[in-house]
Amino acid sequence: MSKIYVLLLVMCSLLAAAPVSAQLYDVRASDVNYNKKPRAAFKVQVDGKATDVRDYFQEWMKSSYNIRFKNGGVLGLIGKSDVLMAKQTPANALSGKLVDLYATIVAPTDSTAEVAVFGGFDDNTFFDPDKTATEYNAMRTMVQSFATAARLKAYRDMIAEAEKKLKTVEKEREKLEKNRVSLQSNTTANLARIEELKKKNIENRTQMSSDSVSLIKNAQQLEESRVRLQRRRDRLSALDRKN
């Protein structure tokens, strides 16, 4: 079985195990409750644990737009999920002015994360499709770019995981093959030993038969020797009496 074929099998198992969602990587307009008011936002769900996606989002925004997010306060009605903030930061992709950007990452499932991005010029002016259409649409493009990057990263991670599993399978195969060769060699040696023992048993039986015949002859010779010895003793006693 070729490595490529095994890798494809592992990839298929990973993809089969991945959650299927019509919303995955689909950027959609929504809103986020921040400071007790709804704020126009763009949301997208991506593969990965929320903590990992949070780290990747911050790294990607820094490398792609030079926007550095920091941990901020607590969202109004979303619960206790910290909001990431980039206050009064230059973002040429959105506007020629300094902007405030916010992001939240929550976990709909153990293996997916939902990223929500919203922003404005200050605490009183947030982007929306009516009053700040240019910035609002540019924010959509930004989130869509992140979704594309996140999708590529997810597939790279899947490939890396598949390659890792492939190496594990290959090591297990090598171990099994080594064990099989060892057992085969041991079995061959045992069979040779069995044949040697069979041959030895045949030789032993032949020798036993020969020894049995020799024992009978020996018994006869022993008896003859005893009789001869007794005769000589009797003759010696007779000679002693005459003298």
Image: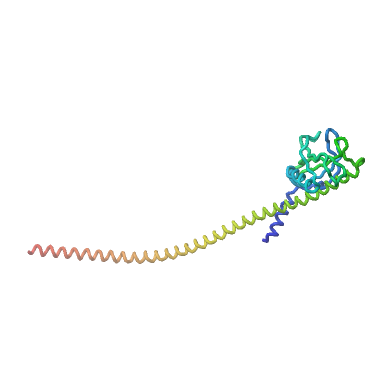
Could you say which is closer to the camera, residue 167 or residue 67? 67
Residue 32 x %, y %: 83, 38
Residue farthest to the right, as pictured: 130
The N terminus appears in which quarter of the rendering? Answer: bottom right
Q: Is residue 178 left or right of residue 134?
A: left
Residue 146 x %, y %: 80, 48
Q: What colour-coding does the image apply? A: rainbow
User: Number of numbered discs present?
Assistant: 0
Q: Is residue 212 left or right of residue 130?
A: left
Residue 201 x %, y %: 42, 63
Q: Is residue 225 left or right of residue 212?
A: left
The answer to which image quadrant residue 240 occupies is bottom left
Q: Is residue 188 left or right of residue 105?
A: left
Could you say which is closer to the camera, residue 51 or residue 26? 51
Q: Is residue 92 above or below residue 194?
A: above
The C terminus appears in which quarter of the rendering? Answer: bottom left
Q: Is residue 111 above or below residue 179?
A: above
Residue beneath the point at 62% across and 57% down? 173
Residue beneath the point at 72% across and 52% down? 158
Residue 67 x %, y %: 80, 44
Could you say which is closer to the camera, residue 44 or residue 18? 44
